Amino acid sequence: MALAVEDITTDHVIDPDRYATSGYPHEAWSVLRREAPLHWFSLGQRPGFWAVTRRADIVSLSKQPTRFINAPRLAVFADSPSPNSRSDGPLLNHLLNMDPPVHATFRNVASSWFTPRAIGRRRPEVERITRELLDGLAKRDHADFVMDVAAPLTLSVLADMLGVPREDWERLFDWTNRVAGSADPEFQEFEDTSVETMKKARDEMFGYFLDLVAQRREQPRDDMTSVLANSEIDGKPMPDFELLSYLLLLVVAGNETTRNAASGGLLALIENPGAMERLRGAPELVNSAVEETVRWTSPVIQFCRTATEDALIHGQQVRAGESLCLFYGSANRDEDVFEAPNEFRVDRKPNPHVGFGIGEHFCLGANLARLELRVIYEQLIPRLQHVELAGPFVRMRSSLLGGVKRMPIRYALS
Protein backbone atom coordinates (compact mmCIF):
# COMPACT_ATOMS: atom_id res chain seq x y z
CA MET A 1 0.00 0.00 0.00
CA ALA A 2 1.31 3.42 -0.95
CA LEU A 3 2.64 5.61 1.83
CA ALA A 4 0.41 8.56 2.76
CA VAL A 5 1.45 11.83 4.38
CA GLU A 6 -0.40 10.99 7.57
CA ASP A 7 1.57 7.76 7.85
CA ILE A 8 4.95 9.53 7.76
CA THR A 9 6.47 9.94 11.21
CA THR A 10 9.73 11.26 12.56
CA ASP A 11 11.04 7.69 12.33
CA HIS A 12 10.88 7.93 8.55
CA VAL A 13 13.03 11.06 8.31
CA ILE A 14 15.34 11.32 11.34
CA ASP A 15 15.60 7.86 12.90
CA PRO A 16 19.30 6.88 12.77
CA ASP A 17 18.46 3.19 13.00
CA ARG A 18 16.34 3.44 9.88
CA TYR A 19 19.15 5.19 8.02
CA ALA A 20 21.57 2.48 9.14
CA THR A 21 19.38 -0.42 8.05
CA SER A 22 17.43 0.98 5.09
CA GLY A 23 19.34 3.97 3.76
CA TYR A 24 17.68 7.22 2.78
CA PRO A 25 13.85 7.49 3.07
CA HIS A 26 13.27 8.29 -0.60
CA GLU A 27 9.66 7.07 -0.61
CA ALA A 28 8.71 9.28 2.34
CA TRP A 29 10.58 12.26 0.88
CA SER A 30 8.78 11.80 -2.44
CA VAL A 31 5.38 11.87 -0.75
CA LEU A 32 6.34 14.98 1.22
CA ARG A 33 7.63 16.77 -1.88
CA ARG A 34 4.39 16.04 -3.71
CA GLU A 35 1.83 16.60 -0.96
CA ALA A 36 3.42 18.44 1.96
CA PRO A 37 6.63 20.26 0.94
CA LEU A 38 6.68 21.99 4.33
CA HIS A 39 5.57 19.49 6.96
CA TRP A 40 5.60 19.84 10.74
CA PHE A 41 6.98 17.05 12.91
CA SER A 42 6.56 17.09 16.69
CA LEU A 43 9.26 15.78 19.01
CA GLY A 44 7.21 15.77 22.19
CA GLN A 45 8.95 17.74 24.92
CA ARG A 46 11.75 18.75 22.57
CA PRO A 47 11.36 21.44 19.89
CA GLY A 48 9.79 20.07 16.72
CA PHE A 49 10.76 20.99 13.18
CA TRP A 50 9.48 21.74 9.69
CA ALA A 51 10.72 19.25 7.07
CA VAL A 52 11.76 21.03 3.85
CA THR A 53 12.00 18.56 0.96
CA ARG A 54 11.82 20.47 -2.35
CA ARG A 55 14.96 21.83 -3.97
CA ALA A 56 13.47 25.27 -4.72
CA ASP A 57 12.57 25.80 -1.07
CA ILE A 58 15.98 24.67 0.20
CA VAL A 59 17.68 27.05 -2.23
CA SER A 60 15.39 29.92 -1.24
CA LEU A 61 15.87 29.44 2.50
CA SER A 62 19.64 29.01 2.12
CA LYS A 63 19.90 32.29 0.24
CA GLN A 64 18.29 34.25 3.07
CA PRO A 65 20.95 33.82 5.79
CA THR A 66 19.64 36.59 8.02
CA ARG A 67 15.99 35.48 7.96
CA PHE A 68 16.88 31.79 8.37
CA ILE A 69 20.03 31.39 10.42
CA ASN A 70 22.25 28.38 11.17
CA ALA A 71 22.55 28.91 14.91
CA PRO A 72 21.58 27.56 17.34
CA ARG A 73 20.35 24.23 15.91
CA LEU A 74 22.81 22.49 13.61
CA ALA A 75 20.53 19.56 12.73
CA VAL A 76 17.66 17.47 14.08
CA PHE A 77 18.52 14.36 16.09
CA ALA A 78 15.98 11.73 17.08
CA ASP A 79 17.55 10.29 20.21
CA SER A 80 19.65 13.04 21.73
CA PRO A 81 20.02 16.80 21.97
CA SER A 82 21.83 18.41 19.09
CA PRO A 83 25.54 17.64 19.62
CA ASN A 84 26.27 21.30 18.99
CA SER A 85 24.05 22.66 21.75
CA ARG A 86 24.11 21.91 25.48
CA SER A 87 23.11 23.74 28.63
CA ASP A 88 26.75 24.01 29.68
CA GLY A 89 27.73 25.67 26.42
CA PRO A 90 28.24 24.59 22.80
CA LEU A 91 30.47 21.63 22.03
CA LEU A 92 31.85 23.46 19.00
CA ASN A 93 31.76 26.84 17.33
CA HIS A 94 32.67 26.58 13.67
CA LEU A 95 31.53 27.62 10.20
CA LEU A 96 28.47 25.39 10.21
CA ASN A 97 26.81 27.25 13.08
CA MET A 98 28.07 30.76 12.33
CA ASP A 99 25.92 33.41 10.68
CA PRO A 100 26.62 36.69 8.87
CA PRO A 101 28.73 38.69 9.23
CA VAL A 102 30.88 36.45 11.46
CA HIS A 103 30.67 33.46 9.14
CA ALA A 104 32.34 35.19 6.19
CA THR A 105 35.13 36.53 8.40
CA PHE A 106 36.06 33.07 9.63
CA ARG A 107 35.51 31.36 6.27
CA ASN A 108 37.90 33.74 4.53
CA VAL A 109 40.77 32.70 6.81
CA ALA A 110 41.20 29.37 4.99
CA SER A 111 39.31 29.95 1.75
CA SER A 112 42.45 30.52 -0.35
CA TRP A 113 43.46 26.91 0.32
CA PHE A 114 40.32 25.64 -1.39
CA THR A 115 40.17 27.70 -4.59
CA PRO A 116 40.17 25.75 -7.87
CA ARG A 117 43.75 26.84 -8.56
CA ALA A 118 45.01 25.87 -5.10
CA ILE A 119 43.27 22.48 -5.22
CA GLY A 120 44.47 21.93 -8.80
CA ARG A 121 48.06 22.07 -7.56
CA ARG A 122 47.29 19.02 -5.41
CA ARG A 123 46.28 16.83 -8.33
CA PRO A 124 49.69 15.10 -8.68
CA GLU A 125 49.64 14.20 -4.98
CA VAL A 126 46.06 12.87 -5.16
CA GLU A 127 46.95 10.88 -8.28
CA ARG A 128 50.01 9.38 -6.60
CA ILE A 129 48.16 8.35 -3.46
CA THR A 130 45.30 6.85 -5.46
CA ARG A 131 47.69 4.93 -7.70
CA GLU A 132 49.54 3.50 -4.70
CA LEU A 133 46.28 2.43 -3.06
CA LEU A 134 45.05 0.75 -6.24
CA ASP A 135 48.41 -0.94 -6.79
CA GLY A 136 47.99 -2.46 -3.35
CA LEU A 137 44.50 -3.67 -4.23
CA ALA A 138 45.74 -5.24 -7.47
CA LYS A 139 47.70 -7.79 -5.45
CA ARG A 140 44.44 -9.19 -4.02
CA ASP A 141 40.98 -10.08 -5.22
CA HIS A 142 38.98 -8.76 -2.26
CA ALA A 143 39.08 -5.67 -0.06
CA ASP A 144 37.01 -3.22 1.91
CA PHE A 145 36.67 -0.22 -0.37
CA VAL A 146 36.02 2.13 2.56
CA MET A 147 39.01 1.08 4.62
CA ASP A 148 41.41 0.34 1.75
CA VAL A 149 40.70 3.18 -0.70
CA ALA A 150 38.14 5.86 0.19
CA ALA A 151 39.18 6.52 3.78
CA PRO A 152 42.98 6.48 3.38
CA LEU A 153 42.83 8.70 0.28
CA THR A 154 40.71 11.44 1.81
CA LEU A 155 42.45 11.21 5.18
CA SER A 156 45.98 11.39 3.81
CA VAL A 157 45.27 14.33 1.51
CA LEU A 158 43.65 16.42 4.24
CA ALA A 159 46.14 15.43 6.93
CA ASP A 160 48.95 16.56 4.64
CA MET A 161 47.19 19.89 4.04
CA LEU A 162 46.92 20.35 7.80
CA GLY A 163 50.54 19.35 8.39
CA VAL A 164 49.67 16.38 10.60
CA PRO A 165 52.57 13.87 10.75
CA ARG A 166 51.89 10.53 9.09
CA GLU A 167 52.30 8.64 12.37
CA ASP A 168 49.23 10.48 13.72
CA TRP A 169 46.89 9.83 10.79
CA GLU A 170 45.28 6.79 12.40
CA ARG A 171 44.39 8.91 15.43
CA LEU A 172 42.67 11.42 13.14
CA PHE A 173 40.71 8.58 11.56
CA ASP A 174 39.57 7.35 14.98
CA TRP A 175 38.50 10.82 16.10
CA THR A 176 36.66 11.39 12.82
CA ASN A 177 34.68 8.18 13.23
CA ARG A 178 33.75 8.98 16.82
CA VAL A 179 32.63 12.53 16.04
CA ALA A 180 30.67 11.69 12.89
CA GLY A 181 29.45 8.37 14.27
CA SER A 182 28.77 9.51 17.82
CA ALA A 183 25.24 8.01 17.63
CA ASP A 184 26.59 4.66 16.40
CA PRO A 185 27.16 2.03 19.13
CA GLU A 186 30.29 0.83 17.31
CA PHE A 187 32.05 4.08 18.20
CA GLN A 188 30.66 4.53 21.72
CA GLU A 189 32.40 3.47 24.91
CA PHE A 190 30.53 1.61 27.64
CA GLU A 191 27.19 3.36 28.26
CA ASP A 192 28.16 6.70 26.72
CA THR A 193 25.50 8.79 24.98
CA SER A 194 26.15 10.27 21.56
CA VAL A 195 26.96 13.65 23.14
CA GLU A 196 29.40 12.05 25.60
CA THR A 197 31.05 10.12 22.77
CA MET A 198 31.45 13.25 20.72
CA LYS A 199 32.72 15.28 23.68
CA LYS A 200 35.46 12.74 24.46
CA ALA A 201 36.61 12.66 20.86
CA ARG A 202 36.48 16.47 20.71
CA ASP A 203 38.57 16.82 23.86
CA GLU A 204 41.21 14.40 22.57
CA MET A 205 41.36 16.17 19.22
CA PHE A 206 41.48 19.60 20.87
CA GLY A 207 44.37 18.49 23.07
CA TYR A 208 46.29 17.21 20.06
CA PHE A 209 45.75 20.33 17.98
CA LEU A 210 46.58 22.65 20.86
CA ASP A 211 50.09 21.21 20.80
CA LEU A 212 50.30 21.41 17.02
CA VAL A 213 49.05 25.01 17.02
CA ALA A 214 51.71 25.96 19.60
CA GLN A 215 54.38 24.43 17.37
CA ARG A 216 53.13 26.30 14.30
CA ARG A 217 53.10 29.60 16.16
CA GLU A 218 56.73 29.08 17.03
CA GLN A 219 57.71 27.70 13.61
CA PRO A 220 55.09 28.29 10.92
CA ARG A 221 55.06 25.96 7.91
CA ASP A 222 53.24 25.85 4.61
CA ASP A 223 50.12 24.16 5.97
CA MET A 224 46.61 25.10 7.03
CA THR A 225 47.31 24.64 10.72
CA SER A 226 49.94 27.38 10.47
CA VAL A 227 47.50 29.65 8.65
CA LEU A 228 44.79 29.18 11.29
CA ALA A 229 47.20 29.30 14.23
CA ASN A 230 48.54 32.68 13.14
CA SER A 231 45.30 34.19 11.84
CA GLU A 232 43.55 37.23 13.25
CA ILE A 233 39.87 38.03 13.61
CA ASP A 234 39.12 41.73 13.92
CA GLY A 235 42.77 42.43 14.65
CA LYS A 236 43.11 39.81 17.40
CA PRO A 237 44.31 36.18 17.33
CA MET A 238 41.51 33.76 16.57
CA PRO A 239 40.16 32.50 19.94
CA ASP A 240 41.34 29.00 20.81
CA PHE A 241 37.84 27.52 20.98
CA GLU A 242 36.94 28.72 17.50
CA LEU A 243 40.40 27.79 16.18
CA LEU A 244 40.17 24.24 17.48
CA SER A 245 36.57 23.92 16.31
CA TYR A 246 37.72 25.05 12.86
CA LEU A 247 40.40 22.36 12.72
CA LEU A 248 37.99 19.69 13.94
CA LEU A 249 35.47 20.64 11.26
CA LEU A 250 38.11 20.46 8.52
CA VAL A 251 39.16 16.99 9.66
CA VAL A 252 35.67 15.54 10.00
CA ALA A 253 33.99 17.21 7.03
CA GLY A 254 37.00 16.69 4.79
CA ASN A 255 37.16 12.98 5.52
CA GLU A 256 33.63 11.77 6.14
CA THR A 257 31.72 13.29 3.28
CA THR A 258 34.13 12.48 0.44
CA ARG A 259 34.86 8.95 1.57
CA ASN A 260 31.12 8.31 1.78
CA ALA A 261 30.48 9.78 -1.66
CA ALA A 262 33.27 7.66 -3.15
CA SER A 263 31.94 4.49 -1.55
CA GLY A 264 28.34 5.25 -2.51
CA GLY A 265 29.47 6.11 -6.02
CA LEU A 266 31.14 2.75 -6.52
CA LEU A 267 28.05 1.03 -5.14
CA ALA A 268 25.93 2.92 -7.67
CA LEU A 269 28.21 1.73 -10.48
CA ILE A 270 28.02 -1.86 -9.22
CA GLU A 271 24.23 -1.69 -9.11
CA ASN A 272 24.08 0.03 -12.50
CA PRO A 273 26.53 -1.89 -14.73
CA GLY A 274 25.35 0.06 -17.77
CA ALA A 275 26.59 3.26 -16.15
CA MET A 276 29.92 1.57 -15.40
CA GLU A 277 30.35 0.54 -19.04
CA ARG A 278 29.28 3.96 -20.26
CA LEU A 279 31.94 5.61 -18.11
CA ARG A 280 34.55 3.06 -19.15
CA GLY A 281 33.85 3.73 -22.83
CA ALA A 282 33.62 7.51 -22.49
CA PRO A 283 36.18 8.73 -19.94
CA GLU A 284 35.33 12.30 -20.89
CA LEU A 285 32.17 11.80 -18.80
CA VAL A 286 34.16 11.68 -15.57
CA ASN A 287 33.21 15.22 -14.53
CA SER A 288 29.50 14.64 -15.01
CA ALA A 289 29.87 11.25 -13.26
CA VAL A 290 31.36 13.04 -10.25
CA GLU A 291 28.44 15.48 -10.09
CA GLU A 292 25.96 12.61 -10.42
CA THR A 293 27.74 10.77 -7.62
CA VAL A 294 27.35 13.76 -5.31
CA ARG A 295 23.68 14.11 -6.27
CA TRP A 296 23.02 10.40 -5.87
CA THR A 297 24.79 9.91 -2.55
CA SER A 298 24.05 13.33 -0.95
CA PRO A 299 26.60 12.67 1.86
CA VAL A 300 25.10 15.33 4.15
CA ILE A 301 21.52 14.29 4.95
CA GLN A 302 20.28 17.46 6.59
CA PHE A 303 21.08 20.74 8.28
CA CYS A 304 18.73 23.12 10.07
CA ARG A 305 17.83 26.76 9.73
CA THR A 306 16.05 28.78 12.42
CA ALA A 307 13.54 31.45 11.44
CA THR A 308 14.35 34.90 12.86
CA GLU A 309 10.90 36.23 11.96
CA ASP A 310 7.48 34.85 11.10
CA ALA A 311 7.18 33.58 7.54
CA LEU A 312 4.43 32.11 5.37
CA ILE A 313 5.70 29.19 3.27
CA HIS A 314 3.41 26.98 1.19
CA GLY A 315 0.50 28.34 3.18
CA GLN A 316 2.06 27.27 6.48
CA GLN A 317 2.81 29.78 9.21
CA VAL A 318 6.40 29.41 10.37
CA ARG A 319 7.01 31.20 13.65
CA ALA A 320 10.19 33.00 14.64
CA GLY A 321 12.41 30.57 16.54
CA GLU A 322 11.09 27.44 14.81
CA SER A 323 13.44 25.05 13.03
CA LEU A 324 13.37 24.17 9.35
CA CYS A 325 15.18 20.95 8.48
CA LEU A 326 16.65 20.99 4.96
CA PHE A 327 16.80 17.46 3.52
CA TYR A 328 19.42 17.62 0.76
CA GLY A 329 18.95 14.01 -0.33
CA SER A 330 15.29 14.79 -1.02
CA ALA A 331 16.11 17.95 -2.97
CA ASN A 332 18.50 15.94 -5.12
CA ARG A 333 15.68 13.60 -6.19
CA ASP A 334 13.18 16.40 -6.86
CA GLU A 335 11.01 15.42 -9.84
CA ASP A 336 10.44 19.09 -10.72
CA VAL A 337 14.17 19.54 -11.28
CA PHE A 338 15.70 16.24 -12.34
CA GLU A 339 14.53 14.03 -15.18
CA ALA A 340 14.23 10.42 -13.97
CA PRO A 341 15.66 11.39 -10.56
CA ASN A 342 15.85 7.79 -9.36
CA GLU A 343 18.16 6.78 -12.19
CA PHE A 344 21.95 7.01 -11.84
CA ARG A 345 23.13 8.69 -15.04
CA VAL A 346 26.83 9.41 -15.44
CA ASP A 347 26.04 11.75 -18.35
CA ARG A 348 23.38 13.79 -16.53
CA LYS A 349 23.41 17.42 -17.66
CA PRO A 350 22.38 19.81 -16.34
CA ASN A 351 22.78 18.60 -12.78
CA PRO A 352 21.90 21.40 -10.34
CA HIS A 353 22.24 19.26 -7.22
CA VAL A 354 22.65 20.72 -3.76
CA GLY A 355 24.96 18.00 -2.47
CA PHE A 356 27.48 20.66 -1.49
CA GLY A 357 24.83 22.97 -0.09
CA ILE A 358 23.89 26.34 -1.51
CA GLY A 359 24.38 30.00 -0.65
CA GLU A 360 26.74 31.28 2.03
CA HIS A 361 27.34 27.83 3.46
CA PHE A 362 28.31 26.18 0.18
CA CYS A 363 30.86 23.52 1.09
CA LEU A 364 34.33 25.04 1.53
CA GLY A 365 35.95 21.77 0.43
CA ALA A 366 33.81 21.15 -2.68
CA ASN A 367 36.75 21.58 -5.07
CA LEU A 368 38.85 19.11 -3.11
CA ALA A 369 36.01 16.58 -2.96
CA ARG A 370 35.47 16.87 -6.72
CA LEU A 371 39.18 16.37 -7.40
CA GLU A 372 39.40 13.26 -5.21
CA LEU A 373 36.30 11.70 -6.77
CA ARG A 374 37.51 12.58 -10.26
CA VAL A 375 40.89 10.96 -9.72
CA ILE A 376 39.35 7.82 -8.20
CA TYR A 377 37.17 7.37 -11.29
CA GLU A 378 40.00 8.23 -13.70
CA GLN A 379 42.31 5.65 -12.19
CA LEU A 380 39.91 2.96 -10.98
CA ILE A 381 37.51 2.47 -13.90
CA PRO A 382 40.12 1.69 -16.61
CA ARG A 383 41.78 -0.92 -14.35
CA LEU A 384 38.60 -2.50 -13.00
CA GLN A 385 37.83 -5.67 -14.94
CA HIS A 386 35.17 -6.88 -12.55
CA VAL A 387 33.69 -5.83 -9.21
CA GLU A 388 30.86 -6.99 -6.96
CA LEU A 389 29.82 -6.67 -3.36
CA ALA A 390 31.32 -9.42 -1.21
CA GLY A 391 29.24 -8.68 1.88
CA PRO A 392 26.84 -6.13 3.36
CA PHE A 393 27.17 -2.44 2.56
CA VAL A 394 27.23 -1.22 6.19
CA ARG A 395 25.93 2.27 6.88
CA MET A 396 26.64 4.43 9.91
CA ARG A 397 23.89 4.99 12.45
CA SER A 398 23.35 8.68 11.74
CA SER A 399 20.59 11.01 10.55
CA LEU A 400 23.13 13.76 9.78
CA LEU A 401 25.73 12.09 7.56
CA GLY A 402 25.21 9.26 5.11
CA GLY A 403 28.20 7.44 6.53
CA VAL A 404 29.53 4.17 5.17
CA LYS A 405 31.47 2.02 7.61
CA ARG A 406 32.25 -1.02 5.46
CA MET A 407 31.99 -2.00 1.82
CA PRO A 408 33.55 -5.42 1.12
CA ILE A 409 34.15 -6.02 -2.57
CA ARG A 410 35.42 -8.85 -4.75
CA TYR A 411 37.12 -7.72 -7.91
CA ALA A 412 39.71 -8.14 -10.63
CA LEU A 413 42.04 -5.16 -11.00
CA SER A 414 44.81 -4.84 -13.55
Image (cartoon, grey):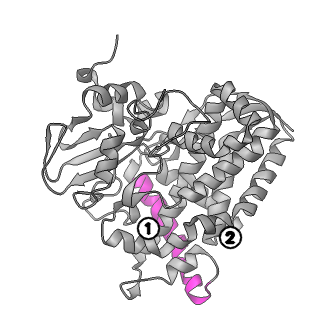
Q: Which residues fall within the magenta stretch?
A: 196-220
Indicate the quadrant where residue 31 lies.
top left
Please give the count of numbered marks on the rendered protein.
2
- Determine if residue 348 is in view: yes
Is 205 part of what is drawn in magenta? Answer: yes
Q: Quadrant of the C terminus?
A: top right
On the image, the x and y values in percent for residue 215 come to 59, 83
Q: Quadrant of the N terminus?
A: top left
Q: Is residue 189 left or right of residue 277?
A: left
Q: Measured from the top left, where is residue 408 in percent x and y?
A: 68, 34
Q: Is residue 185 above or below residue 132?
A: above
Query: In the shown orientation, is residue 231 left or right of residue 50?
Result: right
Tag 2: amino acid: Pro
Asked if the magenta segment contains residue 4, the reply would be no
User: Which residue is under mark 2?
Assistant: 165
In this view, 352 is above or below 197:
above
Res 76 visible: no
Residue 299's spot in the image, x, y percent? 50, 44
Q: Earlier in the sequence, mark 2 or mark 1?
A: 2
- Residue located 39% across and 59% down the image: 361
Task: Say what secondary structure mark 1 lies in.
Answer: helix
Tell me the amino acid under the disc marked 1: Ser
Mark 2 residue element? loop
Q: Which residue is mark 1?
A: 245
Image quarter of residue 270: top right
Name the residue at 27% across, 57% down.
Answer: 64
